[in-house]
Image (cartoon, rainbow, N blue to C red):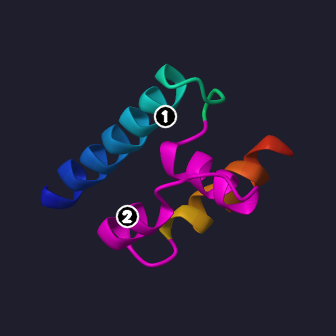
């Protein structure tokens, strides 16, 4: 039962991240983490280091890679 709620909570966090990104002018279905990694690639100001510190060392890169792969479908 704990796993069921944990999975639901993680999905909710992802959707909140996507909502935050759209509110701030980002692309639809792109998380805030993926957007920041894209900014890092383009040498723009970003908060990748902070996000990765909180969620894991390569969180933003993985989010960006997943978003790019989903765009090609």
Q: Is mark 2 on a helix, strand or loop?
A: helix
Does the rendering let one see residue 51?
yes
Q: How crowded is mark 2: few (under 14 residues within 10 Å), some or many (20 or more)?
A: few
Describe residue 10's horizontal placement relative to residue 60 as left or right.
Answer: left
Q: Quadrant of the C terminus?
A: top right
| Residue carrying label 2 | 50
Residue 61: x and y in percent read: 61, 67
Residue 49: x and y in percent read: 44, 68
Residue 72: x and y in percent read: 86, 45
Rendered view: 49 above or below 11: below
| Residue carrying label 1 | 18
Describe residue 66's horizontal placement relative to residue 2 as left or right.
Answer: right
Rendered view: 71 above or below 56: above
Span highlighted in magenta in the image: 30-58
Q: Which of marks 1 and 2 is nearer the N terminus?
A: 1
The residue positioned 74% from the left and 46% from the top of the image is 70
Q: Among all residues in the image, which is located at the extreme left? A: 2
Q: Is residue 52 magenta?
A: yes
Q: Is residue 56 magenta?
A: yes
The residue positioned 46% from the left and 56% from the top of the image is 47
Q: In which quarter of the image is residue 11?
A: top left
Judged by its main secondary structure, the magenta piece is helix
Say if mark 1 contacts mark 2, CB within 8 Å. no
Q: Among all residues in the image, which is located at the extreme bottom? A: 57
Q: Among all residues in the image, which is located at the extreme right? A: 72
The residue positioned 76% from the left and 55% from the top of the image is 42
Q: Which of 11 and 27 is in front in this view?
A: 27
């Amino acid at each position: 039962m704990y796993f069921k709620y944990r999975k639901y909570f993680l999905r909710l966090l992802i959707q909140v991240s996507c909502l935050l990104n759209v509110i701030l002018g980002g692309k639809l279905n792109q998380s805030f983490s993926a957007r920041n990694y894209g900014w890092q690639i383009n040498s723009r100001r970003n908060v990748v280091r902070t996000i990765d510190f909180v969620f894991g060392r390569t969180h933003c890169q993985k989010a960006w890679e997943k978003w790019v792969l989903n765009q090609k479908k």
